[in-house]
Image: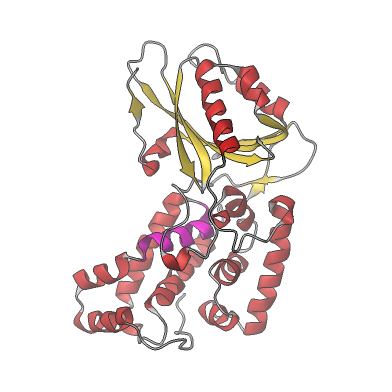
Amino acid sequence: METTEHRPTSPMGADEAAFLRVARSGDAGEFALLTERYRRELLVHCYRMLASYEDAQDLTQETFLRAWAKRETFHGRASLRTWLYRIATNACLDFLDKRRDRTPVPADLHGAAENGTEVLYLQPWPGSAPEDPHEQAVAKETVELAFIVAVQHLPARQRAVLILRDVLGWPAQQTADTLELTLASANSALQRARATLRVHLPNGRLDWKGAGRRELDDQQQRLVSAYVQAHERLDIDALTALLRADLRFAMPPQPGVWVGREATVQAWLDGGFGRDQYVDFRCRTTTANGQPAVAIYLRRPGAPTYDAFTLDVLGIADGLIAEITTFDGDQFEWFGLPSELEPA
């Protein structure tokens, strides 16, 4: 689905004038130069929509293919950035219309009587939000796992409205035009999306805007270091002491959510932590979704190297680890991490 351009908001800039020349000349090289600078922010936009880094990469590329195919429809009445975001949003909506498996499913909860859902297609985002000045107003909370998971509970078009309005700060009419909605429908969709998001965000907060990026404080850095040391020493008691009593642990795409410190630690022990082949770990720290993350390498008996094992993304609250989302080690390359480590 493509839409007509929305109303002009500013005089034509240099990028827009250059793009019009490209559209007339069909210069693919110049097209790439003009649009490539927007790749990372479009990638994070698609990631917010889809919760999958691989899908976001594919849809970002699809955005550029669509933009090239429809370059002659660009008339400079919207900024080039806005035009590309509109194409990316509609590409994501088309993808979601075809992929009915891209919705949360009922969770197999362990250690709790509550009901819940889980996002099995969830993948980590390498690092934090884009550094582009146009994205600096968007706090890192909008790439945190809690936000990404919560947004997945919204119907696709409500999701798009909320991201365009509340994350990117688009005006209501511009959002409505992009999604081919009436202004009243777009505003109604936004209100419904906010109400649903409050249910699924921690403490029902909707106050991510303006919070800005935050570095880990000394206490949090010590907590992450202690998590690394406890793994490498196979110290289950020290590891347990770092966890909140209401810890939530999940391992997408594997089904299952463990709720509570005791249930989670028992799951680790049942899985073999500290015995058999799971006795020789090395760790490196990194950042995923703007959160601290620990890349864990495992050397199995007789193996010459430590191989990529899991990536643990940590949610910290009140000085303890409140959430652990564990991803497969085959995603290390996204973070610039080696697939193996040599013994010290």
**In the image, is residue 241 above or below residue 215?**
above
- Front-most of residues 217 and 300: 217
Residue 237 placement: quadrant: top right
Q: Quadrant of the C terminus?
A: top left
**Apparent side of residue 39 relative to residue 217 in the rendered image (left or right):** left
**Residue shown at 54%/12% (left/top)?**
275
**Residue shown at 48%/14% (left/top)?**
277
**Residue shown at 31%/78% (left/top)?**
15
Image: magenta residue range? 38-51
Label tally: 0
**In the image, is residue 269 above or below residue 325?**
above
Q: Can residue 251 be seen from the camera position used here?
A: no
Tell me, yes or no, whether the highlighted magenta stretch contains residue 40: yes
**Apparent side of residue 194 relative to residue 79 in the rendered image (left or right):** right
Which residue reaches farthest right?
113
Q: Position of residue 321 (x, y in %)?
A: 64, 35
**Apparent side of residue 336 relative to residue 293 in the rendered image (left or right):** left
Q: Position of residue 258 (x, y in %)?
A: 68, 33
- Front-most of residues 229 and 328: 229
Tell me, yes or no, whether the highlighted magenta stretch contains residue 206: no
Q: Can residue 228 be seen from the camera position used here?
A: yes
Q: Position of residue 180 (x, y in %)?
A: 54, 80
Q: Position of residue 285 (x, y in %)?
A: 46, 34
